[in-house]
Image (cartoon, grey):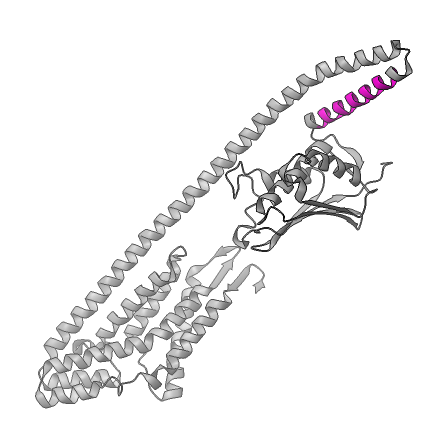
Amino acid sequence: MTKKRISINIDRKSLIMGGILILLGISAPIFINVKNFKIYDFLYESLDKNHQGLLMLAAIRLVLLNGIRGLPHYLGTFIIAESTDVKIKGKSVPHIKGFIALIIIPFVYSAIHTVHNIKYDLGVPAFIVIFAIMYLEKMDYSKISFLKKAIIIILLLLGAQWLDVIPQLSPLRFGRGETSQDIKAIACIIDGIDILSISSSMFFFLFTFAAILVTKLVRDEHKILMSNEENERVERELHETRMKALEARNYIELKHLVHDLKTPLTSVQALVSVIRLMEENPKIQDYLLRIEESIDNLSEMISEILYEDKKNIISTEELFNYILSQISHLPFAFNVEYINNVKDYCVNVNKIRFSRAIINALDNSYNALNDIYDKIYIYIDCEDDEIHIEIKDNGIGIKEEVLEEVVKKGYSRRESTGLGLGFIEDIVNNHGGKMHLKSKYGVGTSLEIILPRVSLDE
């Protein structure tokens, strides 16, 4: 859902899971209650025998009961908060997610009261857990697993429950539930106030300390993961810079080399022309003319290598006949199936560079094949005065999470320079075209290149 500069994205699976847990929390009193835990059995026995140990057992059972019953709806609330991503002007606002807990928990307590006629006390312990959820969402520990963050919630939930059975905290709105008040009342009768207070305080500090310790570990782990991610980003940028420098150096060296080839080629061309003029034998003249035409073609190819903006109008059939001849000696030549429905239609391309882009795409497809007998299909058609070139395979495909990354320079799924799709896209853009990559992991990949159609008289 998007409105102006505020966008809200919700993970549907997490939302459903959180909703199920909340419903489980609402229905929990049916299966988990004071009667099942026999809390009053221990209370009455402690009162009859004046036994402080039985009183503590009743207190422990009450804390476990409240913890187990509260866990589903607190975790459900936490999952729903985690599943919601609020962005303002493109930036995530994590602390807004935490306020979801302030809305959901009171609603759950009200629903339990309506359904079961049991009034859960929305007191300080409940707000301790709510603010813990708000804190975790505000800190946005996105790199940490949900389980580790859930452990913090569980520890705080169990720790906070002990505050409800400390008699001295009753004036501060702790332990207003009926069973909590009964435990404290019996503690007064059997002179168990001290042991109940000391033991409950000890358990509270134990669970709270454990929660703080886990929070610190989670925070440190998050910092390490963020630092590693930043280091990877810097390394990626350095790699891209090195690759660009390498490309530039190789291109300059190639230009010098090709330029050096042009000088003797021009001399050969001039000598062949002179010899043809001097030769009277028609057959030899014909051979010399063919040599001269080959030298012209070679010179044109060298010019296309030297000047990437140099383009010529050529039919799609002529272009792909040249490409297929270039790959005839390569391992994947046998795998290629070529279908051209617009053989006479023309495009304006740098034949050498565009051919290298197509061969690179075919090589990528070949390396993705599951079987050496699988096919790579080249489909060429025209739509709305645009030439559509599709290279399709039924190989291993690309995972959705890395689909956007594979076009970037420096990315490679193999031990290579990683120039593949980035190199192809640069050439397609240089020809005023567009490139679309579609892939499904385990099914295959389709690379579509769209070029403007031109006529021979342009």
Q: Horizontal and vertical percent for residue 305?
A: 69, 27
Q: Residue 353 appears in which quarter of the rendering?
A: top right
- Look at the image and say whether residue 291 sits in the magenta stretch: yes
How many labels were placed on the picture? Answer: 0
Q: Nearer the viewer, residue 24 or 138?
A: 24
Identify the residue at horizontal 43%, vertical 43% (top origin): 232
Q: Answer with left or right where residue 299 lies relative to residue 62.
A: right
In the image, is residue 224 above or below residue 181?
A: above
From the top left corner, tell me how far across and down residue 263 is, in percent.
Answer: 71, 15
Residue 440, placed above or below residue 357 = below
Q: Is residue 275 left or right of residue 426?
A: right
Q: Residue at x 83, y 17 (%)?
A: 288
Residue placed furthest toward the top: 278
The answer to whether residue 123 is visible is: no
Residue 73 sits inside the magenta stretch: no
Left or right: 204 in relation to 149: left
Q: Quadrant of the C terminus?
A: top right
The extreme front residue here reads: 373
Q: Quadrant of residue 111?
A: bottom left
In this rendered view, identify the residue nearer to me: 203 or 39.
Answer: 39
The residue stretch that appears in magenta: 285-304
Quadrant location, the N terminus: bottom right
Q: Position of residue 92 (x, y in %)?
A: 47, 57
Is residue 94 depicted above or below 107 in this figure? above
Identify which residue is drawn at 54% across, 29% down.
Answer: 246
Assign the magenta stretch its main secondary structure.
Answer: helix
Q: Can I make out residue 399 in this image?
A: yes
Residue 334 on image: x %, y %:
67, 42
